[in-house]
Structures are given as structure tokens and as C-alpha cells.
Amino acid sequence: MTGSTFTILLGGALTPTERLARQLSGSRFIAADGGMRHATTLGVIPDVWVGDFDSTDDALLAAFADVPQEHYPTAKTATDGEIAVEAALSRGATSLVFAGALGGTRSDHAFLHLLRVVALAEEGLPVFLTSGEEEAYPLLAGSREIDLPKGSLFSILGLTELTGLSIEQAHYPLEDFPLPFGSSRTISNVAEGPVRFSLKSGRAVVLARPYDLSGA
């Protein structure tokens, strides 16, 4: 990764893995409220710490007292994560990683993160989510390849009706497939190496579990 990649530390689960370490190599970091706890796990010092700090305890504040803080009121019109994204963009971010964006105790935030990365991808920004054990990638009209280990599990969640969906290098390939909204047809597939996707229209998210080799 280049210096223009920023990783947003969020409050969900984050498991340190070798793959995660490679993905975050060279990134700069911004912590959103309690997501700062992941800075200890990753051994990094964020550029800035933003949020209303309602999920931050005194011990965490003391441990990262030297990191610049930007405080916002609890009654605000954006989540701490969205504020962190704006902070990254204002510092010249050209790609984003949301770490700690999946799982956790707030499913509403996790679902929002899935929608947010699709919106950012529509604006042309490379972005993905990770918990270390699970990853999420936006899938829009066009083609893309995701480097997944052979035998690892992945699914496609259609956020709209999909047309012209093709999947290559997978146990269950598809070609020019129309996926109705709400269909489970693309749940639980297995990578046969880096998986290639193409889509004519629609919005979707690829959820991948690179360390899950249990099969579909």
C-alpha cells in the first residue's frame, strides 16, 4: 500500500493475521472513538483520533495521550466512522481500509459500513472492510479480481437486483447471470484462486473468509 492509503480503526472485532498485516503495510491510520484499541493490537500510532469519545475509557485515553484528538458532540448527524473517513479524505487519502468494521455489538454500524463502502466505490475510491478473519468488497458494474486463497469461502450479497453477473475461478462459476434481489443463489462459494467478477448492472458486496477452508 502507498502513503495515500488510510486505515480507519473502528469499534468492531479485529483479529491480527498475516494477511491483515500485508494489507495494512504502508498505510496511515485514523482512529474512530473506541476503535483506537486496535492501535495497540496492530502496533501503530494513528495520525488523529476522532469522535464523541463515548466508547473510550480513561486507560485508552492515557495510553494514546499524544495522538491529536478531534472531539464531536454525541448528538451529531454523522457516525464517528463517517467523520474518520472525512478526516482521511481531507488528508489526501486515495484508498481506504475499514478495520474493525464487521461484527461487534452494533449490527446497525456493521450494516452501515457495508453500504458506505459501496457508496465510496461509486465515487471511484478503492475501499474494503476487514475484521482480519472476514473481508468485504464492493461489487459494481464492471470487472474486478479479488485475491482469495484457494479453498476459501466467499459469498455475494446483492443490495439490488443484479444483471450480467459472472464469476470465474470459483467452485460454482456463473456466466451472465441475472440475480434477483433477495436471492440466496450466490451464498457460500469457494475460491479456486484469485476470483474474477464482472457485472453489467447493480450493487453488491463480496463477503470473503480467507481463512475459512471448510468448503461451501
Image (cartoon, rainbow, N blue to C red):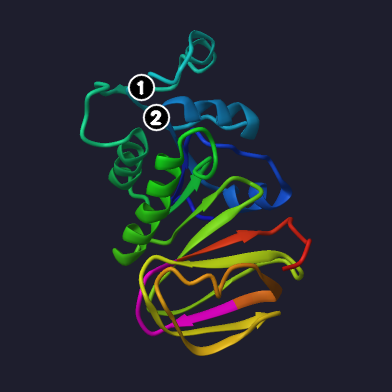
Dot 2 or dot 1: first in sequence order is 2
Mark 2 near mark 1, Cβ–Cβ under 8 Å? yes
Total label count?
Answer: 2
Percent x, y of residue 88? 35, 43
Please report the residue visible at 22 percent of the width from the left and 29 percent of the height from the top. 76
What residue did someone put label 2 on?
A: 48
Mark 1 crowdedness (10 Å alpha carbons): few <14, some 14-19, many ≥20: some
* Residue lying farthest to the bottom in this orientation: 176
The residue lying toward the viewer, choosing from 214 and 58, is 214
Q: Is residue 111 above or below residue 162?
A: above
What residue did someone put label 1 on?
A: 69
Any magenta on residue 25? no
Residue 95 seen in the figure: no
Residue 15 seen in the figure: yes
Please report the residue visible at 31 percent of the width from the left and 66 percent of the height from the top. 122
Mark 2 → mark 1, Cα distance in angstroms: 6 Å
Q: Is residue 86 above or below residue 39?
A: below
Residue stretch in magenta: 196-204
Percent x, y of residue 215? 76, 66
Q: Identity of the amino acid at label 2?
A: Val
Any magenta on residue 203? yes
Label drawn at residue 17 = none
The answer to which image quadrant residue 200 occupies is bottom left
Q: Identity of the amino acid at label 1?
A: Gln
Please report the residue visible at 56 percent of the width from the left and 30 percent of the height from the top. 39
